[in-house]
Amino acid sequence: MIVRHWRSVLLVCTAVAAVLPVSQSFAQTASATTPQATTDDSTILQKIVVKGKRVAPGSVADTPLATEITKKQLEEKQVTNYDDIGRSVDAGVNYSRADAGFNLRGLSGARILTTIDGIPIPYISNSSRQGAFAPANANGGGDTFDFDSLSSLDIVRGADSSKGGSGMLGGAIVLNTLEPEDLIPEGRDWGAIVKSTYDSEDRSLSGSAAAAKKIGGTSILFQGGYRKGHERDNMGDNDSYGALRTEANPADFDQNNLLFKLRQELEGGHRIGLTAERFRWDLKTDLRHLQGGASPRNFMIDNYDGRELRDRDRVSIDYDYEAQSSDAFFSSARATLYWLDLKKEAGSGGRTTANVAYGRNNEIENETWGFSGTATKDFEYSGLSHSVRVGLDVGVSSWSQYSWALCPTSTTCPSLNNQAEVPNVDSQTLGLVVEDKIEIGNTGFTLTPGFRFDWFNYDPSTGGGFANNTGITRFGELRDRTEAAMSPKILATYDLTPDVELYMQLAVGFRAPTVDELYSRFYNPTGRYAQLGNPDLEPEIGRGIEIGANFDTGDFTGRVAAFHTRYQNFIETVTSVDATGFTEFNYTNVAAATISGLEVSAAKSFNNGINLHASLAYAYGRNEETTQRLRSVAPFKAIVGGGWSNETFGFDLSSTLSAGMLTDHLNTPVTNTADTTFDAPGYAIVDLTGWWTPEQLPGLRVQAGVYNIFDQEYFDALAVRDVNLSSATASQPRDWYSEPGRTFKVSLTKTF
C-alpha cells in the first residue's frame, strides 16, 4: 500500500516534468540558454542552500533541508560539547542525555542518523540498563567525536531515508572531519593550527593540534586532541551523601582523539585516500547520591564509583572523482570502503553498607565492515537538465553485549551475572538509491524524484554469553529476521529570485528495529519482572511533508520551514502484569504518532559592523492511540542576539529562551491520577562572548565567553522528562537535576 501510493506520486510528478518542455520553441530556447543557466543556477543554489563548501553530490547533506555549521561558526560560538549547539547555534537541535545523542524534531537515539565522513555511526543500546541517570547506561554512538577534529557539521531535518537509509526519521547529523586543504592556505604547501580551551562548566582543559603538508599531488594530515576535566556543574548546594544530595557527584574524565589522512591526486580528476581515526572517552564518578542510606542508596560512603567508556575506531579507503570533460561517463563519483568499531561500557562497583562487594557492568560492541558509493551523471534531454544519481550501501556487522556482576557470588543473582542480555547478532544490510534532479529549462523550477530500497537481515546466536541467559527457557528461542523497505521522495524547488529558494518535499523515512528491541532478554525471577525484546516488531515508517525557503543576499541569510510527519509502527515500551503479579516490559508497535512544527532562523549584518541573529523552533508531537503528548519533543525554544565586529575584534550578546515542558497526561486517561513526571519550567538565560585577533601577532585568536550571566537556575526539559520528583527512592531533590549556573570559557588558537 505504501509503495503503491508513493510510486503513483512519483510517476505523476515525473510525467508533469517531462510534458512541460514538449513545445519546439521552448526546447530551442532552453537549448540556447541552458549551458549558461546551468552554470548560474549551480552558483545560485550553492549560495542559497546554506550548506558546506564541499557538499558532494549524493551526500546526506546535499539537500535544501540541510544547514551547515561551519568551522568558523563552531569557533565563534565556542562549541566544545554536544549541548553547546542547541544553546548557541540552532534552536532546533537538542542533546538527549538519555539516548546519548542529538534530538531533532522530537526524535533521538536510533531515530537520528549520524555519519562521519559519509560513514554511519551505529546506535547501540541495552534497554535493561538504560536511563539518563542510570550508572550502567551504555546507550549511544553519536557521542564519540571531538569538535576540534571537524571542518563542519551539517544538520539535515526531517524523515527522508532516500538520503541516508535506516534511522533517518527525525533527520541526520552529518560530521565532516578536517581535510588537508582546510589547513593549507592558498599559495602554500603546508599549514597548522593549535588550540587550547578552559571551560569552568566542568573545569576541563583541552588542547588540540593539526598539521597538513602537500608534496606534489600528495597531501597528508595529522590531528590530535586531549581533554581532561571533572563533573558538569549544577545549581545544587547540598554536598551531603544520599537522598538529600543536590550537588553534582565528583567525577574525572579523560578524552582523546587522533585523526590521520592521506590523499593522492591522480590525473583525470581522480583522488584516492586513506583515513584512520580513533576516539576515547573515560569517565569515573563518585556516586555519592547512592551512598550512606537505605536501599537503593545502601552503599558504603566513598566506596561506590561509576565508570563509563566510549571507544570508536575507523579505517577507510576513500575515492573521489570529478569529470574533466562533459562527455565523461560519470560527472562525479565517490566511494568509501570502511571498517568501524564502536564500543561502549558502563557500570558501577564498590561495597554495600554491610561491607559486601557489589558490582554491575554493561559492555556493548558493534563492528562493521561496509561500502558506500555514489555516482552522478549530468546530461541534457528534451530541454531538461538532468542530474541522475545512483548509490549503493552495503554493510556487514557483528553485535555483542555482555554483563557481569558481583552479588557477591554468581549464584546470588544469576539474572545479572556473567551473561549476555542481548545475543550476539550478525547482520547484513543493503541499500540502493536512485534519484534524478530535473531542472526545467530556465524557469527556476527543479523537480527531484527519488527512492531508496533497503534490505536487512539479523541472525542471532544463542552461544557465547547468551547461553547463560536465564530467560531463554521461559521466553523462547530466537529467530532470524529479514525485512525490506522502500523510501520514495519528491522534492520541488523554485528560485523565486537569485537569492531566494522555495522548496516543498514529500518523503518517507524508515527505521529498522534495533538488535536490542528485537532480541533483549532480561529475566529476574527474584524481582518477578522481565525486560523483553519483540522479534515481531515492524520497521518504523515516517511520511512527512515540509514546505520552506532558504535565502542569502550576502548580508541577510536565513531559512523558514513548516513540517508535519506521521509515523506508523512507532516502537514504544508497554508494561503488562499477569494474574500472578509477574511484570513484563515489552516493545510494541504503536499504530500512529504525529509530530508537526515550525522552524525559523535569520542573520543580518550591517556595514557598520553590527549584526543581529535569531533562531526559533516549535514542535508538537503526540501518540495518536492514547492522545498523550510525546515527551521526546522539546518545548518551544528561541536564540536571539546581536553583536558587533571589525577585522580584529568582535562580541555577541545572546539569550536562549525556552518554554516549559507541557504535561503529557501520562496517567490521567488510564487511572485518573495526576501526572508525576517532572515538567521542567521555562527559562531565559543570557550569554556574552567575544574574540580578539591582535594585529601584532598574526594568526593568534583569543576568545572568551561568560554563560548564564545572571546565574539563573534552569532545567533541560528532555534530560528530566522521565524524572519523578515525588519518588523518594528513585529521584534526588529538584536542584540535583539543574543545569550549570554562571560559567566562563576561554580559548587560544594559533594558525600557522
Image: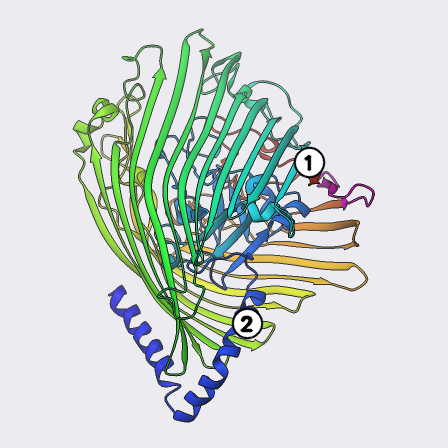
Identity of the residue drawn at 77% across and 43% down = 698
Residue 477: image location, x then y, percent: 16, 33
Q: Is residue 384 visible?
A: yes
Residue 438: image location, x then y, percent: 41, 74
Picture layout, residue 511 above or below residue 422:
below
User: Does the magenta portion include 441?
Assistant: no
Identity of the residue drawn at 67% across and 26% down = 237
Mark seen at residue 741: 1
Mark seen at residue 501: 2
Mark 2 vs mark 1, CA separation in Å: 41 Å
Q: Nearer the viewer, mark 2 or mark 1?
A: 2
Label 2 vs 1, first from the N-terminus: 2
Identity of the residue drawn at 30% across and 75% down = 11
| Helix, strand or loop at mark 1 | loop
Span shown in magenta: 691-711
In which quadrant will I find the C terminus?
Answer: top right
Query: Toward which corner of the image does residue 362 lie, by quadrant?
Result: top left
Picture layout, residue 590 above or below residue 309:
below
Q: Are marks 2 and 1 in contact (CB under 8 Å)?
A: no
